[in-house]
Image (cartoon, rainbow, N blue to C red):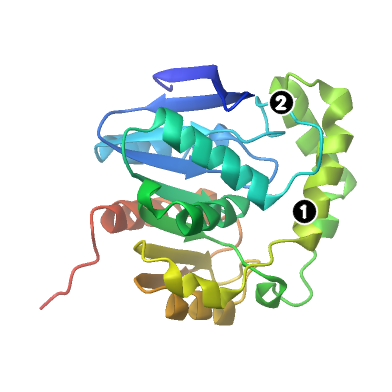
Amino acid sequence: MADTAAYLDVAGLRTWHEISGAGEPVVLLHGAFGGASSFFAQTPALVDAGYRVHVPERRGHMHTPDVDGPLTYAVMADDTIAYLDQEVDGPAHLVGWSDGAVVALLVAQRRPDLVRRMVLIGQYYNSSGKVPGSTLEEELSSPEALGFLRDEYARVSPDGPDHFPVVHAKTLHMILTEPKIDLATLARVAVPALVLQGDRDEVTLEHSRAVVATLPDARLAVLPGTHGLPLESPEIVNPLLVQFLRGGPRPAW
């Protein structure tokens, strides 16, 4: 149960966020169609490790209302920067999963002063990193997925169930056309980073290795799993997150 679960105004956008624990701030950034509940397996472990965990829900996701206009990674990064500036005391650790990893990386590019360390989970940063033959977009439009996503959205969204097709279309368009980050630009991102993915994820190992090779201070971790890695293996993922956020891994000799 979060210590705080409420709406607040962030740069004119009514935004839902949840806060748990006390200590250095960690901001968890969810993926497409997700929200604070996406990290139900991570939040308690991070609180127990002594962190104050923030989970803001971005525009058009779960409790946070949609906004007229397209949904893009750039605008979501702007929203996240505004949240960090307003609600987080000093630089925070960012943990981004899927779409949230793109947002975290864009924040680190634009406002490195707001980021202490970052973890990027299961995401490509341009189309060259997509696994060939991926059916993710088709799966997100299947009757089964549509029914589940619609029900989850209708349960908490202030926009109501009839608005779900609008959000679904915006999100799929973004996934199909973005992100378009030139990996060469990552050489200017000095924030310590952990790039984490499953061995059967939506991003190729070659792409993640290229990301780590370009970032000045980055490590790569590949675990058995899929795009749902944080939910599939929290008993492995959570200690890895805590170790990295505490400054590890440290040399054994």
Query: Residue 37: which quarter of the image?
Result: top right
Amino acid on which the number 2 mark rests in the picture: Pro
Q: Residue furthest left?
A: 253
Along the viewing direction, whichever of 101 and 109 lies nearer the viewer: 109
Q: Looking at the image, is 28 positioned above or below residue 153?
A: below
Residue name at image x 36 percent, y 66 percent? 190
Residue name at image x 34 percent, y 71 percent? 217
Side of 33 where 118 appears, left or right: left
Query: Residue 21: which quarter of the image?
Result: top left
Residue 19, horizontal then vertical, whole percent:
41, 26
Along the viewing direction, whichever of 115 and 188 lies nearer the viewer: 188
Amino acid on which the number 1 mark rests in the picture: Met
Q: Quadrant of the C terminus?
A: bottom left
> Counting residues from the N terminus, which is met first, the one under dot 2 or under dot 1?
2
Q: What residue is pinned by disc 1? A: 174
Mark 2 secondary-structure assignment = loop
Mark 1 secondary-structure assignment = helix
Q: Looking at the image, is 11 positioned above or below residue 102?
A: above
Residue 142, horizontal then vertical, whole percent:
87, 50
Q: Looking at the image, is 203 positioned above or below residue 161?
A: below
Number of numbered discs visible in the structure rendering = 2
Residue name at image x 61 percent, y 73 percent? 182
Q: Is residue 232 visible?
A: no
Q: What residue is pinned by disc 2? A: 65
Along the viewing direction, whichever of 51 and 181 lies nearer the viewer: 181
Side of 21 where 1 appears, left or right: right
Residue 56, horizontal then vertical, whole percent:
53, 33
Along the viewing direction, whichever of 18 and 115 lies nearer the viewer: 115
